[in-house]
Amino acid sequence: MKRTVLGLLVLAMVNIAVAQTKKEQDKEAIKAMCGCYDIDFNFAETFGAEKDYEYHDNYYSGGLEYAFVVEETEDKIVIQHLLVIGDTMIIKHWRQDWLYEHGQLYTYDKDNTWNYTELDDTEVSGQWTQKVHQVDDSPRYEGTATWVHVDGRRYWESEADAPLPRREFSKRDDYNVMVRRNRHEITDYGWVHEQDNDKVIREDGEDELLAREKGWNTYTKVNEAQCAVAKTWWQDNSAYWAEVRNVWDELFASKKTLALNMKVEDKLMFARLFEIGDRYVGKDFKAKKARKEIRAAIQMHLGGDLKLASR
């Protein structure tokens, strides 16, 4: 009997050790997406649901991008991306948050509306949720899945509904939801963001497929010195954007439907937040004052009766 109990204890300890090792492997893979990169974005429509569908031109873009960890805890890794233009210009780009066994998601519906969704613990066991944010740290899409480490490969893939990508939202109105199938794979030269996306017309809870597209975005590591200007920019701007993240987190903590009016009084929300940030560069940063301005700016773009606390 004692031998049986001892055997079970040993087995349990081995299982715990394996689980911890797997989680550490996951975290290493996530952080492997950090660095200075030559980026290359490619998208092509591959299928039209109707025989007379007119395919849109392929999309190509590229540049230099710096990705780095801005926050890390045992169960959370936050990676910020910055675009480097020339020798001096920086554009704050997208952000990805990775949360371990996190079942509290904001899922996209349509018309810039995200609904709070809560998954059971069993549905997210061993998984990482990726929360993707727009340039102003507003929500974009979220998906949860397991990182896979097999045969020398490291990848993660999930499906998530999202608003139209920036490359199309100002040019097209023939669909209103993108169902994104995202695959992040770490490579020997950096990483690849592979996509198989459905362009969907969503009305009254029903989806009609318009077209499908393939996305192939490569991140090739280059000398870190090429992104030195991005590091300097972040030193000057990080305190402000930390407050922006904090205000958005207050909204997410409400667990209420989040509806956004992206353009109010002929100004886009990201432009408002960027203008506020510009006023704080090179000055003594006053977090309380900045937070008050950030709340007021975001409140202007909130739909429905959702209110930010005035504090």
Image (spheres, rainbow, N blue to C red):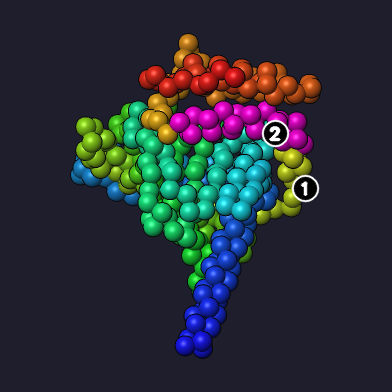
In this view, the residue in front, 147 or 90, is: 147
Task: Give the percent coordinates (x, y) of residue 62.
Answer: 57, 43
Measured along the vertical axis of the image, is residue 80 above or below residue 150?
Answer: above
Which residue is more in the foreground, 105 or 31?
105
Name the residue nearer the viewer: 85 or 70: 70
Query: Which residue is drawn at the image coordinates 23% and 36% (left, top)?
Result: 205
Asked whether, in this view, residue 25 is left or right of residue 58, the answer is: right
- Residue extent of the magenta highlight: 232-254
Instruction: Give the quarter of the figure containing the C terminus.
Output: top right
Tell me the kind of residue under disc 2. Ser
| Quarter holding residue 272 | top right
CB-based contact (under 8 Å), mark 1 and mark 2 = no
Q: Is residue 55 left or right of residue 294?
A: left
Res. 220 in view: no
Residue located at (48% from left, 65% from top): 148
Looking at the image, which is closer to me, 78 or 311? 311
Q: Position of residue 230 (x, y in %)?
A: 72, 38
Cα distance in 3D space between marks 1 and 2: 20 Å
Residue ID for mark 1: 225
> Disc 1 marks which amino acid?
Ala
SS category of the residue bearing label 2: helix
Residue corresponding to mark 2: 238
